[in-house]
Each structure stands twice: as structure tokens, then as C-alpha cells.
């Protein structure tokens, strides 16, 4: 009961002052009062019913375009903030009853030097000439749809919520690999919309035409509506980023409150329906099965290899999704990681059904305390990547009702058995999530409920787990935000102890500084089974500070970024340090053309309470005994210009490791041949010398991609990891049609290298999957 009262006190101390501090007028989607600069105003032109239709061919030359006065004033954020763009950009926006059309001409004084480094859907747009567009369709200064492309006309899309900020750090780079597919946060690059784009390189530069159906978006219907609207252009050979509506250097295109205003939109009501059926054929062989086992198959669709996804636009601002016999055969393989810690590693979600609108369900501290982590659905806890579990089906409802963002999800999984032993891995389960957020100006307040109920014959009456919490994201000033949450769990397995978690986190960003700090606590019985929680029973202070000046006296330097960070875990009962890490980056220099180099120093502490197996492979086992260990490491790194045809990464770390010595060498070699081929070969070697034994780890990934067109590509990922004694291959051929659907060929191969015999095959599979979207 004491813990319950403490929880209520914390809610009151965090949320009540926040509510009291809100202005009475902040009741809807209004421009924040602290934004002194008046927003740029644009007007969309309506195409008359009798007008000639626009030809989406990548050339902004149709009469409908020429009849519109373009917007041309773009301003640099980098390299010289506030200066006019060095190349002219023209933007035109028109619409009809069904679509929004955006035409952009990126004039270039040297068209032959335009950089194109990516040519497949959703590829990184950082190291290529590109544009990225945000559409704040509710004009709420927080949330937006994202659309981007480059001179080859690739499709790049996503969703942003809370201006791209989470309680980790504010997002600062649009289109970067840091926003990788599957990570949890307020920037969701995994949303795939149904839209069209064509681009071309011409004598005046490069230009693009984009057609976005209104049924792809969510919005409030009516006449003469206003949306937030902004465009970022990347002129890569100059490493220059320019904006239609200026954004501070500490932020990026996802700062929705800095967007211009697009007026004059007449938005129709809609009730659209999209059906995406699939058919699949596969051949699988597991060579580790040495005996015939009878494995129960309960899923009635399993042997039919067919399934269906349905998207229903219940209202223009509310979407329902349904899935039957969910399949993820085309999903990219997990990238191998080396784990020298006592805790589970984080592997991101990559399955499309769970990725769309994922930011709606995000709650907690990303990758530290996630109350809902969708990889717990349809994947067992066995192994780093988990064993796939059949999903009968699921439903999801998400969107905006009034001033509330809502998300509801329900899925049902099958039982899973170990084919080698016939033993039960997991019983059938039903998973449910309800998430509600209330937006007030640029702040938000929310609650979440997560439930797992065992539904299989092996489940008892008490086979359940529930998690619930409340959170707030308060915009304290123009550049600072305060995040707070309180969460609790309940299940029959938790008896006594502390079963709640709380956190307060403050983040400040401006042109020179990025400073954040917070305090979190996780009870020793806090148990979100459908979440991600690598450890429990701790109190954790954290701090991070970046200083990012741009010295004008050194023209070859883009930016210097010295920074420090510190976090520590203290036992919730004894107050002793469990783990701590201090990071001190003496200097980090970004050259003008891209890349970076620098040196940093780190201090580590760890206190294992029991024997800790740090390595167990190749017949060697190394165990670290209990105790408090402190060690230091010095690191140097160099990353060349990533837009160059040939690039490299070099890192070297040297110092201690527990009570021994440590050396690590990391290299990668990147090669871009033309506009269609990308290859990366990496190698990381870690040499560890301890009193209890010496060992080394090797991790070697090879990534290759070739794009035949913007919608047809082949990708290969081959990985060797001596810690798991595994050589794995994943080869994917994607022939896309619309919105990420099409024909997929996937080959997987796993080989055991523990006996230095690469022909010891553990398993292989070949899958052909065809999926097609149909709109009604």
C-alpha cells in the first residue's frame, strides 16, 4: 500500500502543476504563443473539374503548374544559418477532389554534379540531393505525414508525432540512418503510404511531381482548411540544407511548429477501403531436427499460405486495420550484435503490421523501459531474435478524435512447440493495447493499458499480465520539453516488492546546445511482459550535454561537437551502484563535406551479483565472478564523407575490461557504383584478456543492394558472428507495385561454424510471396 500511495503522490506532483501551468486559451490546434515569427502563408490552387489532368512525369511543365505562382524563398540552416539558399527552388501546390499535387523544381547551376546515392524505396536521403516534405494535416503543430524523394524519384515516407521528440533525445537529422526501420520513437519511417512520384534531371537542375491521394491521409474535413507545410532541400555536393520555412539548427524538418501554413484546401469526406491479400509458397528445412516430432498445428490457415490485410478509413481522421493469418516472410533479417553485458540486447521491430502508427503506442523511456514492445507478439523469448509464433489475426484502430490521439490494438497468437523436443515454448495468447493522448497546444497528456491473457489449453486461470501508466510531455519553453511517466504492472507472478516505475526527463535544444537530464526508477517486481525491460530494481540518474558551434574562421570545418554524458544504475534496496558509464568526447569535428573524426574517453563500472558468463563459444567459457569492477577506455574514430563513391569507417578502442585488458578494432568499407549499387563490408574484432581466460569476438557483416528501378531491388545481408558460431545469409528480391506491396523472393541460410566447417548447415528456407493492394 505504501508504494501505491507513493505512486499517487508522484502523479499529483508531476501532472497537477503541469495542468495548472497551461494557459486557458491552449485548448486546440493553435500556433504556439512563444513562436514570435509569423508563419509563412501559402495558398493551394484548386484544379477545376474541366481542367486537363496533370501528367505525373517528373517535369513541372503542365499548364496547371505554370498557372500557379511558385514559392521561391528558401533559407539555409547549414552551412550558414539564416543565409539565402545558393540554388533556386520553386514550389507549387494544387489539388482536385481526389489528390494533393506538389511540384518542385530544384534549380542547379551545375546539373552534372547532382549527387544521387540511393535508388530504392525508403532509402536514406541524407547523402543524396533530395527533398523532404511534412504535412501537418490537423494543423496541430505536433504531428505530420512525411514524404520525400530524390532525382531518381524514390518513395520515402513516414509519420512524425510530438515534433519528432521523444524522452530519449530530440531528433536532429531528417532521413538519417539513425532513424532506422523498427526503432521505437516519435519518428516512424515505417509507414508506407499509397502515393505517386516521378523525378527527372533536366538542363535546369532536377524536378519532381508528387500526387498524394486524400484517402492516404487523415485530416479534418471542410472547406478552406489550413495545414502545416514545410519542405527541406538537400544540396549534397555543397552539404547544404535549406528550408521553405526556417528551422533552428538544433532541430530539423520534423519540428512541425516551425512549418509554413498551406491555406485554401477543400477537404472531402471519405470512406475508403483497401484490401491487401497475399499468397505464399515456401520450402523450409531445419537440419537440427534429428527425430520425428509431432507438432500440433492449430492455425486453420497455416497450410493454405494465404492471408489478408484490410485498411478501412472509418472517417477521414480515423483508420481501422485488420489482419488475418499474418505473415512476415519478406521482413529483413536482424543484424547480428556482440553482447559483452549481463543484459538482453535490443532488436528492433521490422514487421509491417506493427510498424505502422507505432509511435501512437510508444510509452516510457525508449529502449530502457517500454511498456509496449510489439516483438513480444508472435516471437518467443528463445534466442536473440526469437522463434516465430503463428498469429491468427489482429485489429487496430488509430487516429484523432477531437483533441485526442487514440490507438487500440488486439492480436491473437497460436501455441508454439519446439520441433526438436516437442516441448511447449509458449501457450496461445491474446494481446491488447489501449492508448489515449490529449494534445494541448504543443504539450500532450496520455494514458496506456497493455494486457496479455493466456488462452491456450496449457494456460491457467492466472496466466495474465497487465501494465498501465500515465504520461505527459510538457512544452516548457520554445526549445525545451519536460517528459514524465508513471507506470505499474500486475500479474500473479508478482507478489510483494515494488511493481511500479516512474521517470522525469528534461530536454533543451538550441543552435549551440543540446542538454538533457532525468531521473528514473524501476521497482524490483515491475514486470511488463509485453514490453521491453532489460533490467529492474534500480534508480537511474542521467545527463547529456552537446556543444555544437560552427567556427567561421576555419572554413574546412562544418561543426565541432564536444559532448559528455553520464548515467548510473543504483540498487533500489541497497543504494549501491550496479552499473555506470561516463562518456567524455574531447573533440568531435565534422568537416564541411561530411563525415567526422574525434576522440573520446569512457569510464565504466559494473557489479555482477552472481557469476556472469561473458563468453561461451568454440569450446571456451569465460566467467566473471561477483564484485565491483571499474575500468577505463580510450577511443578514436574516423568516418569519411559518406556521399563519396568510396567511404570508410575506422574505430579503435583500448583500455580495461572488468579486471583485464581490452582492444577493439572496427572497420567498414563502403562502395557506391553509379546510382544503383551500394555495398558495405564491415569487420569488428574485440580482444579481451581477463584473469579467468582470454577470448576474442569477431563480427563481420556484408551488405549489398542493387536497385533495378525505384521499385525493384535486390538486397543481401551475410553475417558472421563467432560469439554465436553462426554464419547467416538473407537475400531479398523485391518487385514492388504500390505502397510497399508486390512480389518478394526471400532466401535464408544458417550455418554452424563452431567446428570450423562452414558446410554444417543448420537450416535454410526459400519463400515466394505476392501481395497486392486494391482500393475501393
Image (cartoon, helix red, strand yellow):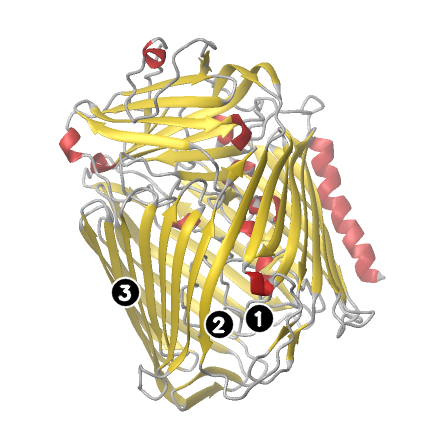
Between circles 2 and 3, the one closer to the viewer is: 3
In this rendering, the answer to whether 602 lies above or below 393 is: below
Between circles 3 and 1, the one closer to the viewer is: 3
| Residue designated by label 2 | 605
Question: Toward the viewer: 434 or 51?
Answer: 51
Residue at (48% x, 87% y) in the render:
623
Residue 651 visible in the current orientation: no
* Quadrant hosting residue 3: bottom right
| Residue designated by label 3 | 682
In this rendering, the answer to whether 566 lies above or below 571 is: above
Residue at (35% x, 82% y) in the render:
753
Give the spatial CA distance, label 2 vs label 1: 8 Å
| Residue designated by label 1 | 577
For residue 759, the mark is none
Residue at (54% x, 77% y) in the render:
607
* Numbered marks: total: 3
Callouts 2 and 3 close, C-beta under 8 Å: no
- Left or right: residue 502 versus residue 257 is right
Callouts 2 and 1 close, C-beta under 8 Å: yes
Looking at the picture, how far across and down is residue 372, in whole percent?
63, 55
Few, some or many C-alpha atoms within 10 Å of disc 2 (few <14, some 14-19, many ≥20)?
A: some
| Residue farthest right in this picture | 1
Mark 2 or mark 1: name the one nearer the start of the chain: 1
Quadrant housing the N terminus: bottom right
Few, some or many C-alpha atoms within 10 Å of disc 1 (few <14, some 14-19, many ≥20)?
A: some
* Quadrant hosting residue 271: top right
Secondary structure of the residue carrying tag 1 is strand
- Left or right: residue 504 versus residue 756 is right
Few, some or many C-alpha atoms within 10 Å of disc 3 (few <14, some 14-19, many ≥20)?
A: some
Mark 3 or mark 1: name the one nearer the start of the chain: 1
Secondary structure of the residue carrying tag 3 is strand
Amino acid at each position: 500500500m505504501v508504494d501505491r500511495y507513493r505512486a499517487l503522490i508522484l502523479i499529483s506532483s508531476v501532472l497537477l502543476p503541469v495542468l495548472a501551468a497551461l494557459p486557458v486559451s491552449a485548448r486546440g490546434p493553435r500556433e504556439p504563443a512563444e513562436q514570435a515569427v509569423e508563419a509563412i502563408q501559402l495558398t493551394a490552387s484548386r484544379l477545376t473539374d474541366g481542367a486537363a489532368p496533370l501528367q505525373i512525369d517528373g517535369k513541372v511543365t503542365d499548364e496547371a503548374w505554370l498557372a500557379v505562382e511558385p514559392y521561391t524563398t528558401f533559407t539555409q540552416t547549414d552551412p550558414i544559418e539564416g543565409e539565402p539558399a545558393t540554388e533556386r527552388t520553386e514550389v507549387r501546390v494544387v489539388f482536385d477532389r481526389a489528390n494533393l499535387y506538389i511540384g518542385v523544381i530544384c534549380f542547379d547551376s551545375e546539373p552534372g554534379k547532382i549527387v544521387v546515392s540511393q535508388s530504392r524505396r525508403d532509402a536514406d536521403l541524407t547523402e543524396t540531393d533530395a527533398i523532404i516534405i511534412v504535412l501537418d494535416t490537423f494543423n496541430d503543430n505536433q504531428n505530420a505525414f512525411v514524404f520525400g524523394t530524390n532525382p531518381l524519384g524514390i518513395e520515402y515516407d513516414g509519420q512524425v508525432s510530438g515534433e519528432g521528440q521523444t524522452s530519449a533525445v530530440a531528433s536532429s537529422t531528417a532521413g538519417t540512418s539513425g532513424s532506422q526501420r523498427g526503432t521505437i520513437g516519435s519518428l516512424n519511417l515505417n509507414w508506407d503510404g499509397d502515393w505517386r512520384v516521378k523525378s527527372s534531371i533536366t538542363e535546369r537542375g532536377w524536378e519532381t511531381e508528387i500526387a498524394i491521394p486524400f484517402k492516404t491521409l487523415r485530416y479534418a474535413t471542410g472547406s478552406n482548411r489550413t495545414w502545416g507545410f514545410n519542405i527541406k532541400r538537400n544540396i549534397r555536393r555543397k552539404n547544404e540544407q535549406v528550408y521553405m520555412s526556417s528551422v533552428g539548427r538544433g532541430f530539423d524538418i520534423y519540428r512541425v511548429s516551425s512549418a509554413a501554413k498551406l491555406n485554401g484546401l477543400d477537404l472531402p469526406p471519405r470512406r475508403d477501403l483497401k484490401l491487401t491479400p497475399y499468397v505464399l509458397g515456401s520450402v523450409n528445412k531445419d537440419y537440427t531436427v534429428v527425430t520425428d516430432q509431432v507438432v500440433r498445428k492449430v492455425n486453420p490457415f497455416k497450410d493454405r499460405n494465404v492471408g489478408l490485410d484490410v485498411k478501412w478509413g472509418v472517417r477521414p481522421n480515423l483508420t481501422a486495420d485488420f489482419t488475418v493469418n499474418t505473415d512476415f516472410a519478406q521482413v529483413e533479417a536482424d543484424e547480428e550484435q556482440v553482447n559483452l553485458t549481463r543484459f538482453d540486447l535490443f532488436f528492433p521491430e521490422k514487421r509491417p503490421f506493427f510498424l505502422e502508427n507505432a509511435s501512437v503506442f510508444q510509452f516510457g523511456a525508449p529502449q530502457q523501459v517500454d511498456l509496449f514492445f510489439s516483438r513480444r507478439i508472435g516471437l518467443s523469448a528463445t534466442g536473440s531474435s526469437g522463434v516465430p509464433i503463428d498469429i491468427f489475426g489482429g485489429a487496430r484502430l488509430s487516429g484523432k478524435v477531437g483533441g485526442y490521439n487514440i490507438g487500440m490494438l488486439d492480436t491473437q497468437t497460436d501455441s508454439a512447440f519446439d520441433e526438436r523436443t516437442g516441448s511447449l515454448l509458449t501457450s496461445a495468447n491474446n494481446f491488447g493495447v489501449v492508448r489515449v493522448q490529449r494534445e494541448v497546444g504543443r504539450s500532450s497528456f496520455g494514458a496506456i493499458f497493455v494486457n496479455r491473457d493466456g488462452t491456450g489449453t496449457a494456460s491457467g486461470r492466472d496466466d495474465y499480465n497487465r501494465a498501465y501508466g500515465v504520461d505527459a510531455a510538457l512544452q516548457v519553453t520554445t526549445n525545451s520539453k519536460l517528459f514524465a511517466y508513471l507506470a505499474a504492472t500486475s500479474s500473479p507472478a508478482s507478489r510483494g516488492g515494488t511493481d511500479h516505475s516512474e521517470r522525469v526527463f528534461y530536454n533543451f535544444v538550441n543552435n549551440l546546445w543540446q542538454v538533457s537530464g532525468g531521473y528514473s526508477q524501476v521497482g524490483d517486481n515491475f514486470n511488463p511482459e509485453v514490453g521491453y525491460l532489460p533490467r529492474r530494481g534500480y534508480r537511474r540518474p542521467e545527463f547529456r550535454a552537446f556543444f555544437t558551434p560552427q567556427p567561421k574562421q576555419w572554413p574546412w570545418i562544418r561543426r565541432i561537437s564536444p559532448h559528455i554524458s553520464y548515467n548510473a544504475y543504483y540498487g533500489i534496496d541497497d543504494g549501491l551502484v550496479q552499473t555506470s558509464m561516463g562518456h567524455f568526447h574531447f573533440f568531435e569535428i565534422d568537416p564541411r563535406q561530411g563525415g567526422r573524426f574525434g576522440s573520446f574517453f569512457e569510464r565504466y563500472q559494473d557489479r555482477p551479483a552472481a557469476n556472469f558468463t561473458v563468453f561461451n563459444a568454440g569450446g571456451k567459457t569465460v566467467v566473471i565472478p561477483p564484485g565491483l569492477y571499474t575500468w577505463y577506455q580510450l577511443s578514436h574514430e574516423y568516418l569519411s564523407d559518406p556521399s563519396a563513391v568510396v567511404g570508410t569507417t575506422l574505430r579503435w578502442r583500448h583500455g580495461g575490461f572488468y579486471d583485464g585488458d581490452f582492444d577493439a578494432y572496427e572497420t567498414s568499407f563502403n562502395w557506391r557504383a553509379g546510382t544503383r549499387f551500394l555495398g558495405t563490408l564491415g569487420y569488428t574484432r574485440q580482444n579481451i584478456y581477463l584473469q579467468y581466460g582470454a577470448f576474442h569476438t569477431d563480427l563481420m557483416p556484408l551488405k549489398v543492394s542493387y536497385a533495378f528501378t525505384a521499385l525493384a531491388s535486390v538486397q543481401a545481408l551475410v553475417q558472421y558472428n563467432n560469439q554465436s558460431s553462426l554464419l547467416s545469409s538473407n537475400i531479398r528480391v523485391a518487385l514492388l507495385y504500390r505502397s510497399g506491396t508486390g512480389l518478394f523472393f526471400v532466401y535464408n541460410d544458417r550455418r554452424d561454424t563452431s567446428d570450423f566447417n562452414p558446410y554444417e548447415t543448420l537450416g535454410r528456407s526459400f519463400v515466394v510471396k505476392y501481395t497486392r493492394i486494391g482500393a475501393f
